[in-house]
Image: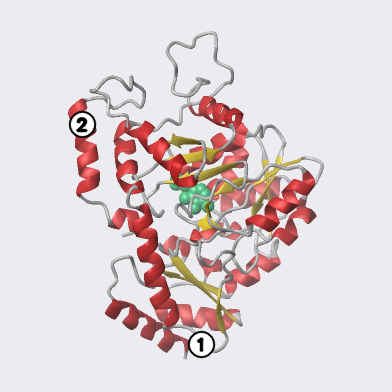
Amino acid sequence: MPGPGSQWIGEEEVKEILDVMSSGHLFRYGSLEDPGFKHKVYSFEKEFAACCGLKYALATSSGTAALLCALKAVGIGEGDEVIVPAYAFIATYSAVIFAGGIPVLAEIDESLCLDPADIERRIGPKTKAIMPVHMLGNPCDLEAITAVADKLGLPVIEDACQANGASYKGRRLGGKGVMGAFSLNIFKTVTAGDGGVVVTDDEDLYRNAFGFHDQGHSPLRGGVEVGRRSVLGLNFRMNELTGAVALAQLRKLDRIIAVLREKKRQFKESITGIEGMKFRTLNDPGGECATLCTVIFDSPERAARVSRKLGTTTVNRSGWHVYSNMEHINRYLRDRGLPHGKGAYPRTDDILSRAINLSVGVVDAGLGAAFGINIDSSKEEIRETAARFREACR
Ligand SMILES: *Cc1c(COP(=O)(O)O)cnc(C)c1O
């Protein structure tokens, strides 16, 4: 099972789905007064915004769409540069590109998130935004990153696709920047098969994102709007079936995070104190999703040896999230004379070559997390897995 939410799909999701199917109303819009309209997407948005302590949440068809809507909402267009980390996901880069902008990559630090100290080196006259990624369920150093952004007068968009349920200094992610984006694909903390969410406290940005996600319409489509549509948009709407599953899953999110944190605590406790190995930096140890446990070794050779014994891989060799392993992005960067290919971000290369992702709740070979535990692992299984890990480190 890829993610903890998908592992916990049960009667609650079935009940919400049946509610929609028996109503026959699958489109997200309708009259809230009509008892035949179950408004799952609407309810999901309200509950999601409340979870984040923010005014607005906009449901979308994917996390990629959420990122694109957020980028267009803040006004990213032709030739605008957006600073992104060199360890992310393809969608972080492609959303910037299809918004018309140019992703400018920066180094990560030992939290495996954007290094605040490397941002200013990447700034140029065309820089228009900073988009840090809360990688592997772990909040990035938001305080330092927003401090740099504020100094430069740049908006921060939080790519929180991998960190739904995480918080930073007591507050859910997505609200420290001007906008945040989440994903509901099957590898994330909670899932609806696919889907995404944009959050913000700013009404104008919400209206922009809403319009972009639905052919220029204003929020909740107040009737016929011909002649009054303010922006040009596309269609990234969520439908009621997706909304039904998303709603049931969202109501499980707090429990999922609490269980993962407890299982990670047990797992981590039994693999601490290994010579030449440390855990990645947590920018807010109490706030992470605990979907993964990332260990960093002193040398790449040792990390490679351990990962081989475990039947997994070091993070630099995991295919999907490392800049140098994305042939299409490398081609794009090369054609524009931008740094690309292995060696272009040496600090990122070094950290990722010494790191192994151990699964706690997200079991994903694409993240290099083929070895570890999952949300339903028993105490005994956690002990055994820890023992196998310690053995491989010998
Ligand atoms: C999953 C993910 C996305 C968006 O993914 P979708 O599959 O489109 O929902 C964006 N950024 C990051 C960092 C991700 O991990």
Towards the viewer: 330 or 106 = 106
Crowd tier of the residue under label 1, counting other residues whose Cα lies within 10 Å: few below 14, some 14–19, many 20 or above:
few
Extreme-right residue of the structure: 125
Residue 233: x and y in percent read: 54, 24
Residue 202 visible at all: yes
**Residue occupying image coordinates x 61% and y 82%:** 298
Residue 363 visible at all: no
Real-space CA distance between mark 2 and mark 1, rounded to the nearest whole angstrom = 53 Å
Point out the tag, 2 or 1, that comes first from the N-terminus. 2
Crowd tier of the residue under label 2, counting other residues whose Cα lies within 10 Å: few below 14, some 14–19, many 20 or above:
some
Residue 305: x and y in percent read: 50, 82
**Residue occupying image coordinates x 78% and y 54%:** 120
Q: Is 382 drawn above or below residue 40 in the view shown?
A: below
Toward which corner of the image does residue 260 lie, by quadrant?
A: bottom left
Q: Indicate which disc residue 273 carries.
A: 1
Toward which corner of the image does residue 278 lie, by quadrant?
A: bottom right
Name the amino acid, label 2: Met
Towards the viewer: 182 or 329 = 182
Is 71 left, or right, of 80 in this rendering? left
Q: Which residue is mark 2?
A: 21
Towards the viewer: 201 or 302 = 201
Q: Is 391 drawn above or below residue 64 in the view shown?
A: below
Residue 62: x and y in percent read: 44, 40
Secondary structure under badge 1? loop
Q: Indicate which disc residue 119 carries.
A: none
Q: Is 166 drawn above or below residue 60 in the view shown?
A: below
How many marks can you see? 2
Secondary structure under badge 2? helix
Name the amino acid, label 1: Gly
Extreme-top residue of the structure: 227
